[in-house]
Amino acid sequence: MKYSVDCLIPVPGSAHCATKLVDLLLLIEKRVGSPPSSVVKHRAHIQSLLAQAKILENHARRRKEEASRARKRERRRILERRSKRLYSRAEILREEAAQALKTSQSFDTLRHHNPRRAILIRGDAGFGSIENSTLLIELGYNFLLKGYSPHTARVLAQGVAESQWIRFNPVVSVAELGIIKLPGCPYPVRVVLGRTKTAKSQVFQYFHLVTTVPERLKDAIEVVKFYNARQTIEAFIKTGKNVLNLKHFRVRNFHGIQFTLVLGLLAHNFMNWARREIFAGTPLARMGIREFVQQAMRVPARVKPLEMDMPITLFPETSVYAQALIRATEKKSTVQMLLPFSN
């Protein structure tokens, strides 16, 4: 069974989403399963960090010995500062190795009994750092990420001939770079380069997608299409913030926030159902939640009482939403629930 998982996880406002990738992967493996590969590469990365730390510590020790033999005070101070910097860098590497070992043990514990799944991680530029790409490769994941640095994309574009660019749409072109090694990444990965140019700006803007999906399965055009499918998720996030007003919580504790989010999701699902139910059979059944809330639900109307019959609801003739509502209602029932429009 195959799974495509988008990087979508709530984090505190003080934490960058890229720092939560390990938490996201652990959550995926708890609920879905684990990729076929083990964490052998990740453990090799830990050994590499420890080896680098040992080299730095040896350099620091030699600088300290040189400082003890130095005759001039200024020379002694310079060597002591260099020794301290080397020790600090070695300590940082050992802390990274300790954290990586803890992460590796967490994944080992999960994967001991987990079912094996074909999982593909799809994430935006917030997750597209070299460190995250390296981590995903070492943990055995397939992925499609947008590169974090536009500068890297611009540098890559310098070596692309004009004939290599393929038109994706009127403003976007893509180029297949194949499997290459990006600066800072110890493993080769496939890179698809993109450039955009709008009517207002005559300067190209570049982006790059990093993926393990082979070209025989998806060419450059299909890779970009697959990445762009994340737009539905981005639209859902914006809808939650701007339409359902989920950007300023009135509670601070975890369970209060959880309850607020559940209510927001229920409201979203109800409005989604209501939109399709009310405007079924009309083009407006496909309108977005934002339009439904801000336009369709705000159509003015008034009730006209009758002496011998039920009151009638009068809508403005110029409202396309009222017209669609009348047509949809008339299709569902032979009884005229809403009577003709009024000015």
Image (cartoon, rainbow, N blue to C red):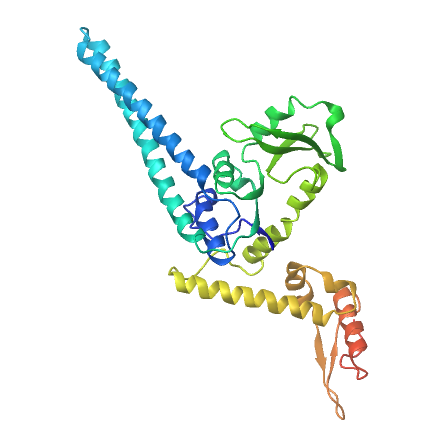
- Residue 312 pos. (x, y %): 74, 82
Which residue is painted at 39% across and 45% down in the image?
103
Query: Residue 291's image quarter?
Result: bottom right
Residue 33 position within the rendered picture, expressed as x and y whole percent measured from the top left: 51, 55
Picture quadrant where residue 67 is located:
top left
Location of residue 157 with respect to 292 vertically, above or below? above
In percent of width and height, residue 157 lies at 64, 25
Q: Quadrant of the C terminus?
A: bottom right
Furthest residue toward top: 71
Q: Is residue 149 visible?
A: yes
What x and y, as percent, mark residue 220?
70, 37
Specify whether residue 342 is in view.
Answer: no
* Left or right, 329 with reference to 11: right
Residue at point 68% right, 24% down? 160
Q: Nearer the viewer, residue 192 or 206?
A: 192
Q: Is residue 68 above or below residue 173?
A: above
Q: Which quadrant is the N terminus positioned in?
A: bottom right
Q: Is residue 135 left or right of residue 105?
A: right
Q: In the displayed orientation, state which residue is furthest to the bottom.
A: 308
* Point 45% across, 51% down: residue: 111
For this view, does 260 lie left or right of residue 223?
Answer: left
Query: Is 149 or 316 nearer to us in this picture?
Result: 149
* Residue 176 or residue 40, whichever sits in front: 40
Tally the numbered discs: 0
Q: Is residue 55 above or below residue 25?
A: above
Query: Is 82 left or right of 166, judged from the image as shown?
Result: left
Instruction: Pick the residue in front: 340 or 72.
Output: 72
